[in-house]
Image: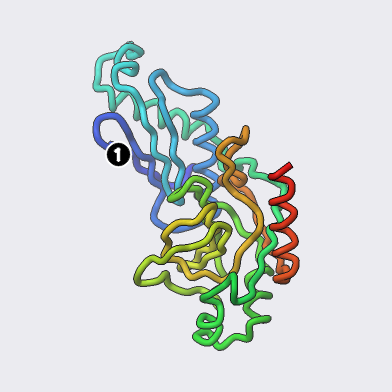
Amino acid sequence: MDKAHKIFPLGDAAACIQWGQTIEESTSRKIISVYRQLRESPFPGLKDLVPAYCSLSIYYDPLQVRKAQSKEGTIYDFVCCKLEDAIALSSDESEDSKQVFRVPVCYEPEYGPDLESICNMKRLEREEFIRIHTDSVYRVYMVGFLPGFTYLGTLDDRIRVQRKDQPVLVEAGSIGLAGYQTGIYPFSSPGGWQIIGRTPLRFFEPYAEVPVRLQMGDQVKFYPITGLEMREWKLQAETESAN
């Protein structure tokens, strides 16, 4: 049975389906399922779909929708009917990625400038913090903010921290914490998350066939690497890029 949802307009050319206000895997699965249903069987005029933690935004062309209407009623009424149909046809047991993406992270101070202060605040040894962060398999709940930025959850209570009061410049590949989330910055940008490490992997390749490495529903497991391994990894990537 579908978890309680509501549909409401976003202006005159978009609508949103909302499933509560909390981060839950069951909600994420439902969103992915409805997203796939609409992608595979789009209604006339559908332009774009934007999934998030608890919602799916639907953008459409009102003129194309009007042309497709066979009954009286508003354009929005027609879209709502199509969305309700998609929800009814979707499965609560959406098939997520079975692969776990292993992501190397260097937690040394050069790459994790906020890690020491977090450890002091949480009264954790650095090694214990890293063990906690790398023990979990995280779910990609959302991709956004920046192209390829991954919102992963959920964090162990022992290492949960609030975001910074003011954003700072964050390097590409940085691993951040904010609330119950951990995330990966795909390229250098201002950001307010607490930075605990950095990965040498690239998560956004604008000219690749699939520019974004991770998608909603994917699973991620971090593992620690040394500063030497980090430098060797980056050197190898630069060499391959030059060739």
Above/below status of 122 relative to 230: below
Above/below status of 4 relative to 105: above
Nearest to the observer: residue 76 or residue 192: 192
> How many circles with numbers are drawn on the protein?
1
Counting from the top left corner in percent of width and height, residue 194 is at 48, 70
Counting from the top left corner in percent of width and height, residue 158 is at 56, 78
Dividing the image into 4 quarters, which one contains the C terminus?
A: top right
**Direction front: furthest residue:** 242
Above/below status of 48 relative to 8: above
Residue at the image point whose x is 75% and y is 62% from the top = 232
- The residue identified by callout 1 is 8
**Label 1 environment density (alpha carbons within 10 Å; few <14, some 14–19, many ≥20):** few
Residue at the image point whose x is 37% and y is 31% from the top = 59
Nearest to the observer: residue 228 or residue 25: 228
Nearest to the observer: residue 80 or residue 226: 226
Q: Is residue 157 left or right of residue 76?
A: right
Colour basis: rainbow
Q: Is residue 158 left or right of residue 220?
A: left
Q: Secondary structure at mark 1?
A: strand
Q: Is residue 60 left or right of residue 210?
A: left
Residue at the image point whose x is 49% and y is 42% from the top = 31
Q: Is residue 54 left or right of residue 235?
A: left
Counting from the top left corner in percent of width and height, residue 221 is at 68, 60
Residue 83 is drawn in which quadrant?
top left
Residue 182 is drawn in which quadrant?
bottom right
Q: Amino acid at mark 1?
A: Phe
